[in-house]
Image (cartoon, rainbow, N blue to C red):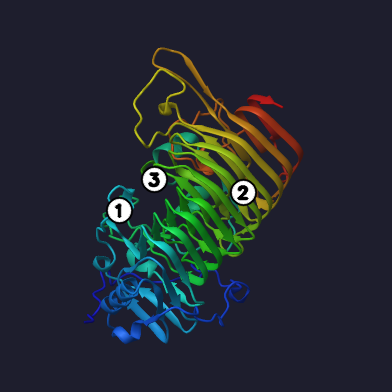
Amino acid sequence: MRNQEVISYPWLGNIYPGDYLESIPFDQYIRNDQPLPEHKPIFDIRDYGAAPDELLNTEPMRLACEACRDAGGGVVLVAGGSYRTGTVRLYDHTTLFVAPDAELVASRNADDLIRRVQGTQDFGEESSGGAFILAIDAQDIAITGGGRINGSGEWFVHEPRQKPALTPFPVTMLPTRAQAKEINTVPGSIRTFYRDRIRYAEDKYGEGKPVLRRPSAMVWLLRCQHVRVENIVLYDSMCWTLHPEACDSVLIRNTVIDDNRHVANTDGIDISGCSNVEVDHCFVSCADDGLCVKNPVYTNRISENLYLHDCTVCTVMNAFKIGTGTRHDIRRVTVENCLFTMPDIYPGSVSGISIESCDGSRVEDIAVRNIRMEKIQCPLYILLNRRNQAGEPYSEEASSLYWGGDISHVTIEHISAWDAELPAILTGFEDRTKAGKTIRKPIRGIQVTDYHVAYRNNREVLHIPDSFDEFLTDYPESNAHGDVDAYGLWIRHADKVALRDIQVTPRDGNTREMIRLYDVNES
């Protein structure tokens, strides 16, 4: 049985110039001649009543996926048109094959996509089961075929306050630390420039808008093993685009993520609490973090052995990021041979490399190398603080997770960046207990080598404070610290720091030093 779609918010769905990157080289990532897997049964959704028309195909999709499951696995085939449907659940030994002449399109009705699914109760906001493509506790899952999965993202967020900016802003100005703490926007600041163009599901600015319901992921793979996402276009996500969570053995290769770059929270690839993951030769264009590694409280496991390489990332936010959900350990992560760029809208991406531990994670053995950046505001950002999202109880002991985790053994090398706007910030923190004991939490073993940056030669307006906030419990973002007294690298509370071959070309009229060190022990 198929039903007519009932659109939750029919006044939404507009697209504006600059929302999408028009220059994605799809032919370098997606092949149109991929054959169907051999020696596997085929479950064509058309055989179960699916048709590419205005009616929803949720029931035919369910029947095809469950028939594949009951047969012990096979191929669920989507071919011959555009099929709109609610949530698609995949099971063991299933290949979802979206052919080059086909796409799966998410229903614009929130009720078709947001529902509680057994087995997700302990997994944060995703516990609603709010995903378009969903697999839980499954083995041997593949999503492939050369076609497109469309999340209908603009239909779940409010209109932006400002249309996309297609010309550069003449001035770079940050909010002061106090302004960044108190309000979301400061007129004239780069923080305001990009936030005013983001479409939120919430009433972000107290304008009396309703809170919109939307799924929390377009593709959510929870506690799965042996996952492959390859030769597929993921388009217009409504929130996180591709989210493997608590998975083992994941390969993401030759995948294009083509999101609306102004739909809030549309991260590209969020690897949460996973181990043995490779992301190879992907193109990611999105509104939030591009390649992101997390390990929040509810995964309850170590994340390790992650290799991300040969990717291009175009994002409004952070191109590569560890954080912010960081409760359990993250180790042995390598990112190399990537391009981070924002070629066509303004301002540039918030940061290129962002490594954070906020909630107790030990983040260690991280290597980021051979990275080119174009129009990235802050090339490098490393921050340790004690946000403590897990709610650890207070303790006088520095070893308590109340006082945060650790960032150690980080290698940053062979970095080239053009049109930067902000200095790199690398910082741990210092605080005092209720009894007055000093707690010093440095970042440790940081090596930055062959780091070459050139600023965009626009005008800057600086508000350098007399003292610098410790940034103890705030959400980490490079443009929320306010100005610092260095234009190249500003490093504080750090042990065993090695800086070699650092070249940073500032704006004309620069008044700051290239490097400033506070409470830093160099190796």
Q: Quadrant of residue 299?
A: top left
Q: Which quarter of the image is occupied by the N terminus? A: bottom left
Q: Which of 149/429 is in front?
A: 149
Q: CA distance from mark 1 to mark 2?
A: 30 Å
Residue visible at 41% across and 45% down in the picture: 184
Within 10 angstroms of label 3, few (less than 14), some, or many (20 or more) residues? many
**If the image is split into quadrants, where does the C terminus sit?**
top right
Determine the residue positioned at 33% across, 78% down. Answer: 84
Q: Earlier in the sequence, mark 1 or mark 2?
A: 1
Q: Which residue is mark 1?
A: 120
Q: Which residue is mark 3?
A: 299
Neighbourhood count class around disc 2 (C-alpha, 10 Å): few under 14, some 14–19, many 20 upward: some
* Label 1 Cα crowd, 10 Å radius (few <14 / some 14-19 / many 20+): some
- Location of residue 437 in the rendering, given as x and y in whole percent from the top left corner: 46, 13
Q: How many marks?
A: 3
232 relative to 245 in the view: left or right: right
- What residue is shown with label 2? 334
